[in-house]
Image (tube, helix red, strand yellow):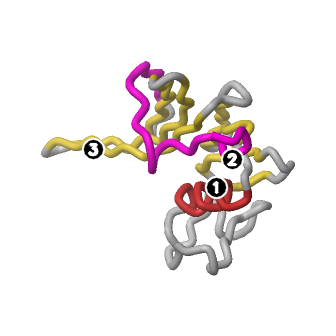
């Protein structure tokens, strides 16, 4: 993506937004939903470019899997989103992860396809998994 590209983001639930998704609230009041548009780069990548280009921040991030919703603390220095697949021969497990970064460390909440969940404290994985605040002059 370059500065000339239009940044396509879903600001409401449409046919392009799946049942399992992250939802980001931005410092300008917008709400962005993870989409499944295959012809575009991943939504998280587009969101990172958008907030950087416009000097915005993610003010809240939540994960919705069916009726289950995980919400992170507001106004963190960085937010994390990633997907994780584990497999060995006869089984595989898919997980959706969201978290926040602060001072080089991260708190990541992982929810698997059976809605089992756990939280991991680890090093901040950095970009492209982490989107940092761009409204603070950093």
Q: Which mark is residue 92?
A: 3
Task: Give me the C-alpha separation between circle 3 and circle 1.
Answer: 35 Å
Task: Give me the C-alpha separation between circle 3 and circle 2.
Answer: 26 Å
Residue 53 in the image: x percent, y percent? 67, 61
Q: Which mark is residue 23?
A: 2
User: Quick check: is 133 in the magenta stretch?
Assistant: yes
Residue 71 in the image: x percent, y percent? 68, 30
Secondary element under disc 1, as helix, strand or loop, is helix
Give whichever of discs 3 and 1 has the lower sequence position. Answer: 1
Residue 122 in the image: x percent, y percent? 39, 22
Give whichever of discs 2 and 1 has the lower sequence position. Answer: 2
Pointer 3: residues within 10 angstroms few (<14), some, or many (20+)?
Answer: few
Q: Residue 72, located in which quarter of the rendered image?
A: top right
Is 15 placed above or below 135 here?
Answer: below
Camera-nearest residue between 133 and 24:
133
Residue range in magenta is: 116-138
Camera-nearest residue between 104 and 120:
104
Residue at 64%, 34% (x, y): give it.
Answer: 68
Q: Which mark is residue 1?
A: none
Q: Which residue is mark 1?
A: 52
Residue at 55%, 74% (x, y): give it.
Answer: 2
């Amino acid at each position: 993506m370059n500065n000339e590209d239009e940044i396509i983001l879903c600001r409401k639930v449409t046919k392009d937004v799946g049942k399992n998704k992250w939802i980001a609230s931005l410092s300008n009041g917008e709400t962005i939903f993870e989409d499944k548009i295959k012809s575009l780069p991943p939504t998280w990548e587009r969101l990172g470019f958008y907030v950087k280009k416009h000097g915005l921040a993610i003010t809240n991030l939540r994960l919705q899997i069916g009726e289950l919703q995980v919400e992170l603390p507001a106004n963190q220095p960085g937010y994390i989103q990633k997907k994780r697949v584990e497999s060995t021969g006869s089984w595989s497990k898919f997980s959706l992860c969201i978290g926040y970064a602060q001072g080089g460390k991260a708190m990541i909440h992982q929810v698997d396809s059976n809605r089992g969940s756990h939280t991991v404290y680890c090093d901040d994985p950095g970009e492209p998994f982490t989107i940092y605040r761009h409204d603070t002059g950093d």
